[in-house]
Amino acid sequence: MFLLRSASLANESSNHVPVIDEKQSTFVPRLIHTVKKTKQISLSNFVFSLPQQNGRVDPLSSTSNPGLIRLFCFRHGERVDLAFGPSWPELAFDKSGNYHRINLNMPMSLPNRRNPFRDFIGDSPITEIGINQARLTGEALANTDSYAQYCYSSPALRCIQTAHYILQGMGIEDRVKIRVEPGLFEFLGWYERGLPMFFNSSETMFNNNDEESKLFNIDRNYRPIIPIKKLSRDEKYTDFYNRSYKVTQQITDKHKLTGRTESQSSIFNSFAFVDILGANIFFIGHAATLEVCTRQLCGFQPRSYSDFNGVIRKVSYLGLQLCERNPSDGQWALKPPPIPPLQHANNNAFDWQIMK
């Protein structure tokens, strides 16, 4: 139920605050009339009575700042191929295709792939440290009430895994589905030999009888803005900026009105400029995601290719860029993330034989 009450009453005892129900009051129609006439609304005049779960405000029903749309852009966690080298499958798989980790930082288990030697080389999973990076990030965000209400991921396995463990760190992995969006994949100009065999693009991924399909809470009803077959290896870096901007625009525009029920939709459908509840949207992608999904959104031109490369080299694992849309004027701006960055030292493998 969508409920509003006057801010002038907010300081009174909760037992004496009259709650206004849209179905029982003329308040919402008057609000809509005001919006129609002035095409603006001051959210500071209202406080919100939001759905609760177990006696607490349901974190997935609202943001901590009503009216704000917040876009959280993340880089994935530590990837196996960069930690152990591109030939790691040759070391970790026997001739029969059985997996045996040779280092504690290698994943305890891996999803089944049709051809692990080929598929994992092109589409690397994340390490155990990468899993913990993602969980720590999710836990920290939950502690600031910055819960994901919508989660979009690049089709790369490392991104889907990172999305899963961020949501797990928040304790909402069963409630928030991961929407796999190929348009969030990184620059295609880096893939001259062809795109990877993405984990989620295999025809067995969406077979309910297949073990792979049960690993992650994938939204099977989501229809990508840019399907995998539309990704072109002939892409220029400016095309990459524009592709990412297109995806970002369409997704953020889609969530201008968030948390409404079907009955509320009929009231607000013609007022897309009224951002009543706001939304936290998560993009789980690559180092470049933090740049290309926010740069043009905030009104800036794409960087030169050399500057572009220089910037993304500075994005560490689980790097986070936060972008907010001001509900009063619709302008986007970069903001400080609600959590501190993540840093840890390198730790080389120890060889016990050095002390023989």
Image: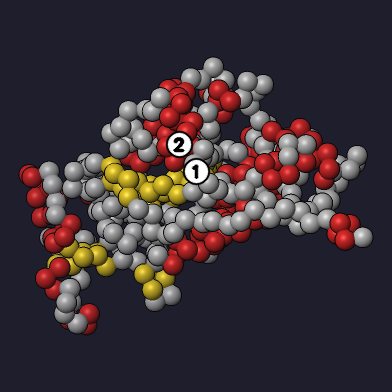
Relative to 284, residue 247 above or below: above
Which residue is at the front of the view, 159 or 77? Answer: 77
Q: Residue at x 51, y 59 (%)?
A: 138
Tell me, for residue 333, which label it has, or none. Answer: none
Q: Position of residue 10 (x, y in %)?
A: 17, 73
Image quadrant holding the C terminus, namely bottom right
**Which residue was labeled with disc 1?**
315
Q: Residue lying furthest top in this view?
A: 234
Q: Quadrant of the N terminus?
A: bottom left
Q: Does residue 124 appear in this view?
A: yes
Q: Residue at 21% x, 65% y: name it.
A: 47
| Residue at image point 44% right, 55% down | 148
Outermost residue, front side: 355
Q: Residues within 10 Å of mark 1 (few under 14, many from 20)?
A: some
Q: Amino acid at mark 2?
A: Val
Say which residue label 2 marks: 311
**190 vs 146: above or below:** above
Q: Position of residue 21 (x, y in %)?
A: 22, 65
Q: Residue furthest left?
A: 37
Q: Residue visible at 42% across and 54% down? A: 149
Q: Quadrant of residue 63?
A: bottom left
Q: 54 left or right of 285? A: left
Task: Using the image as rendered, state which of residue 296 and residue 283 is in the foreground.
Answer: 296
Taking the image as shown, residue 326 lies to the left or right of residue 193, namely left
What is the distance, in whole Å, between disc 2 and disc 1 at their CAs? 7 Å
Asked if residue 296 lies left or right of residue 111, the reply is left
Q: Is residue 65 left or right of residue 293?
A: left
- Amino acid type, label 1: Val
